[in-house]
Image (cartoon, rainbow, N blue to C red):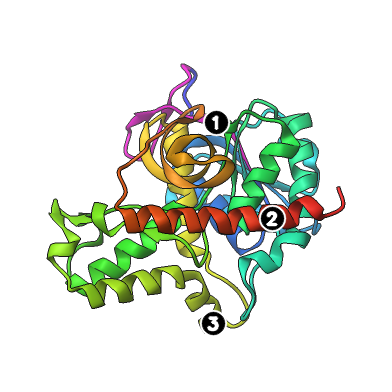
């Protein structure tokens, strides 16, 4: 709960730095699930759901709020259709947009989701110019670039959820193959949040033991391939929707790092200005995250094959950016 002195005291009595308001744009499966996770984490005094469908954000917000007495959180959760509710927000998470259907690539979503992101980025610029904005809408690398371009916000305060989710999937598959605890697997997935993502085998380990020492090349190749198709695998199984449990866990991890000023080293879709030899593009790279967003981008040594794969991944993002540039503004 929030104490008069300005500190937030969680369910376990631990004192933590809290945000005032978090706004989640979009109240679908992603937005609703994320709002629930954020409320249960008690990282803000208020979480606001915004959606164009009247009743949807209000209903989900009320449902989440009514779980507070059971779960012990004190966060106020509200819902609205008005973008004016962005005012005073510390963190904005853009989840609105069409979800993938079987057979669709993330790039197929580009044109329709660009219109949604444009309206929201303009609203953030107007109502919450000091907020840190986390973009989730797919294709996330392109939508992150577009959100930053439209909003005019500093690159450090606009980034996308990308490698955090892909890395979680990768770590899960590695843990399953080795029959070890997922938390003991560390590593990074760089590049676009799509088919050309780059799981870094050379920097993956299990409690310090290099992954390449633990699994044969053919099994590693299978894990990499499954990671690249992680989202599509779930879409094909669900048939009528896309993943939202792992994605919102990833998004909540990012928001917590901001709220607590944790200086976490996490992979996100950040704006590059020469890092990794690339400029003027948003793509998944390791960064240090704190209260003001991206504190710095961390360049890591890549093997020649990994660097070539990363360049191909960036090229795929640039191809989508070229399509975006031709759309009516």
Please report the bounds of the magenta region as a residue range: 5-23
Taking 5 as reference, is 116 above or below it? below
Q: Can residue 167 be seen in this view?
A: yes
Number of dots carrying numbers: 3
Q: Do the residues labelled 2 and 1 touch (CB within 8 Å)?
A: no
Labelled disc at residue 227: none
Q: Gap in Å between the C-alphas at discs 1 and 3?
A: 35 Å
- Residue at horizontal 73 percent and vertical 49 percent from the top: 117
Q: Which of 249 and 329 is in front in this view?
A: 329
Q: Where is residue 214 in the image (x, y as percent from the top left)?
A: 13, 67
Q: Please tell me in which quadrant of the rendered image residue 114 appears.
A: bottom right
Q: How crowded is mark 3: few (under 14 residues within 10 Å), some or many (20 or more)?
A: some
Q: Outermost residue, right direction?
A: 328
Q: Where is residue 27 in the image (x, y as percent from the top left)?
A: 67, 57
Labelled disc at residue 236: 3
Labelled disc at residue 96: 2
Q: How crowded is mark 2: few (under 14 residues within 10 Å), some or many (20 or more)?
A: many
Residue 29 lies in the magenta stretch: no
Q: Nearer the viewer, residue 95 or 154?
A: 154
Taking 260 as reference, is 38 above or below it? below
Indicate which disc, 2 or 3, sits on the residue closer to the N terminus.
2
């Amino acid at each position: 709960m929030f104490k008069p002195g300005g500190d937030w005291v969680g369910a376990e009595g631990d004192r933590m730095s809290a945000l005032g308001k978090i706004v989640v744009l979009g109240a679908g499966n992603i937005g609703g699930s994320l709002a629930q996770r954020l409320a249960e984490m008690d990282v803000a005094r208020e979480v606001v759901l915004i959606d164009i469908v009247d009743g949807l954000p209000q209903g989900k917000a009320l449902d989440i709020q009514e779980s507070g007495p059971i779960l012990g959180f004190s966060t106020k959760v509200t819902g609205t259709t008005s973008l004016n509710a962005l005012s005073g927000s510390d963190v904005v998470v853009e989840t609105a947009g069409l979800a993938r259907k079987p057979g669709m690539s993330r790039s197929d979503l580009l044109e329709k989701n660009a219109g949604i992101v444009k309206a929201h980025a303009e609203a953030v610029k107007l109502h919450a110019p000091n907020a840190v904005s986390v973009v989730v809408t797919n294709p996330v690398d392109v939508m992150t670039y577009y959100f930053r371009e439209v909003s005019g916000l500093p690159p450090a305060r606009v980034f996308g959820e990308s490698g955090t989710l892909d890395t979680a999937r990768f770590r899960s598959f590695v843990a399953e193959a080795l029959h070890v605890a997922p938390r003991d697997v560390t590593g990074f997935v760089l590049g676009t949040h799509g088919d050309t993502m780059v799981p870094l085998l050379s920097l993956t380990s299990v409690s310090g033991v290099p992954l390449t020492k633990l699994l044969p090349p053919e099994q590693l190749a299978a894990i990499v391939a499954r990671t690249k198709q992680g989202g599509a695998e779930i879409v094909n199984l669900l048939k009528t929707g896309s993943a939202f449990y792992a994605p919102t866990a990833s998004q909540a991890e990012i928001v917590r790092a901001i709220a607590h000023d944790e200086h976490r080293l996490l992979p996100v879709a950040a704006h590059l200005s020469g890092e990794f030899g690339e400029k003027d593009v948003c793509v998944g790279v390791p960064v240090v995250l704190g209260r003001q967003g991206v504190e710095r981008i961390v360049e890591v040594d890549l093997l020649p094959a990994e660097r070539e794969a990363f360049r191909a991944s960036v090229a795929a993002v640039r191809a989508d950016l070229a399509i975006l540039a031709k759309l009516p503004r």
